Image (tube, rainbow, N blue to C red):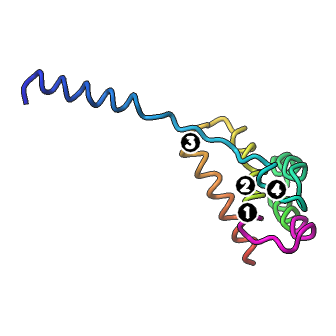
Amino acid sequence: MTGAGKRAMVALLLVAACRQPTEQMTCPDPQTVAPPTIGAAFINGLTGRLAGPDRENMITEALAEIRRRDPTLDKTTIINIMVAAECPNVFAKPDHDPKTMRARIALFRAQVMQLLSS
């Protein structure tokens, strides 16, 4: 490849890299996640409780409360409610790398799934 060819290839790669959209992460809107039996206010309140010192017990208590409020909810809906509540806590952490944030959410989701299965 000639010098001009190499420069053209590098320029093409730079243009392609610049076109890559920056990955944006957002939290789900509690209004759209929460069924009427649960409500967005429950999710918003749960966010603060999940950030507290007794996180493990709070997760268990929240799952029990969701089941009391609406025993007909399926596991996917319950998990989505919990993730919507936890998401702002993930954003509050100092590292806002999308890969790290997705990993934190995935870990939380797995924890909730495990609790729902037991």
Task: Please report the bounds of the magenta region as a residue range.
Answer: 64-77
Q: Tell me which amino acid carries mark 4.
A: Ala
Marks 2 and 1, Cα distance to the nearest angstrom?
A: 6 Å
Residue pointed to by mark 2:
83
Quadrant for residue 14, please give it.
top left
Query: Foreground: 85 or 20?
Result: 20
Reply above or below: 80 against 93: below
Residue pointed to by mark 4:
34
Reply above or below: 54 against 116: above
Query: Foreground: 73 or 109?
Result: 73
Marks 3 and 4, Cα distance to the nearest angstrom?
A: 24 Å
Asked if the magenta segment contains residue 57, the reply would be: no
Q: Tell me which amino acid carries mark 2.
A: Val
Residue pointed to by mark 3:
98
Residue 107 located left or right of residue 79: left
From the image, which quarter does the C terminus lie in?
A: bottom right
Marks 1 and 3, Cα distance to the nearest angstrom?
A: 20 Å
Marks 2 and 4, Cα distance to the nearest angstrom?
A: 11 Å
Element at label 4: loop
From the image, which quarter does the N terminus lie in?
A: top left
Q: Tell me which amino acid carries mark 1.
A: Ile
Residue pointed to by mark 1:
79
Assess whether mark 4 and mark 3 are in contact (beta carbons under 8 angstroms): no
Assess whether mark 1 and mark 2 are in contact (beta carbons under 8 angstroms): yes
Q: Tell me which amino acid carries mark 3.
A: Pro
| 4 or 1: tag closer to the N-terminus | 4
The residue sitting at the bottom extreme is 118
Instruction: Answer few, some or many: residues within 10 Å of disc 1's Cα (few below 14, many 20 plus, some between 14 and 19).
Output: some
Q: Nearer the viewer, mark 3 or mark 4?
A: 4
Element at label 3: helix
